[in-house]
Image (cartoon, grey):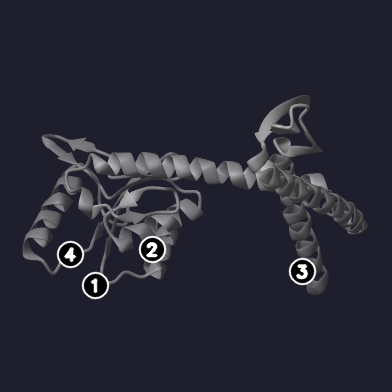
Amino acid sequence: MIEVKMLTEQLAQAFLDTYLRIGELNKQLVHSPGTLVWKGTQKKYSYWQYYVKGKQIQHYVKSSELASVQNQIRVMKEQKKRRSALFTFLSALKRALRAFRIQWQEILISYEKKLTEKKRQQIQHQKAKNIAAQKKYTQQYKHATDRGDLVASKSEEIIANLLFSRGIRYEYEKPLTIGNWRLKPDFTVWKKDGTMLIWEHAGLMEEKKYAEKFQEKLKVYKNAGFTPQKNLIITVDENGAFSAEEARRMIYLYRLD
């Protein structure tokens, strides 16, 4: 069974690769020179032709450029031969896929979806970079997440990637006003039922000022009704590192997915 799966995956990949190669050749051949080259009546120029949107266009070529044009034509002929061979191979691959009841159209649809998702992530990543560039300490935000956010530490990247991979809605450093305090929780997270939680990760507790500020932040949360084991998640770096397993444990304990 495993061997059949590997074979079908290889067939699908071979089909996609061949299809894309034909597409690239088609692009190259759109503006390729035609097969006709002859001397002009005045023997000062030679001509070569190609097609633009199906319309034949003739260009004058200097005699000194004739060898170059002829070489282009030879290349074009080889490309057409290669394309023809690829079409034959593509047809054979389609037949092989049908034997395994695989629709080749589904392979192309899946590929297009992946391209669309990749473009979406690139756009989102660029937006995140633009937002990060406006932050006060831009140099701190240098870790890119799978969703395209730029976060301040590797530990935050681990948390963000786990939330994203599990389809958990979250915002990074979303401003939150509590009384006279304007805070930026590391992560604002929502359960599927809409319940909001705060996830704070302490990465530098060994630094006195950082630890004091973090504790002050927790007091503000407590006064606003955010408490651990209810709607406030707190994780801490241990010996300068953070385990993804600890983040998974918190996701499970707080029933985020």
Badge 1 or badge 2: first in the primary sequence = 1
Q: Cα distance, mark 1 to mark 2?
A: 15 Å
- Tell me where residue 33 appears, x and y as whole percent: 73, 38
Which residue is at the far bottom? 239
Residue type at mark 4 is: Leu
Q: Which residue corresponds to mark 4?
A: 204
- Tell me where residue 201 appears, x and y as whole percent: 26, 58
Residue type at mark 3 is: Met
Q: Which of the labelled discs sits on residue 240, or is there none? A: 1
Q: Which residue corresponds to mark 2?
A: 247
Image vertical order of residue 178 relative to residue 106, above or below: above
Label 4's element? loop
Residue at 17%, 64% in the rendered image:
204
Instruction: Confirm or deny contact between disc 1 and disc 2 (CB under 8 A).
Output: no
Q: Cα distance, mark 2 to mark 4?
A: 17 Å
Q: Give the label, 2 or 4, closer to the camera.
A: 4
Q: Which residue corresponds to mark 3?
A: 6
Badge 4 or badge 3: first in the primary sequence = 3
Residue type at mark 2 is: Ala
Residue type at mark 1 is: Gly
Q: Cα distance, mark 4 to mark 3?
A: 47 Å
Q: Residues within 10 Å of mark 1 (few under 14, many from 20)?
A: few
Label 2's element? helix
Side of 43 where 217 appears, left or right:
left
Q: Cα distance, mark 4 to mark 1?
A: 8 Å
Q: Give the label, 1 or 2, closer to the camera.
A: 1
- Tell me where residue 137 appears, x and y as whole percent: 17, 48
Q: Cα distance, mark 1 to mark 3?
A: 42 Å
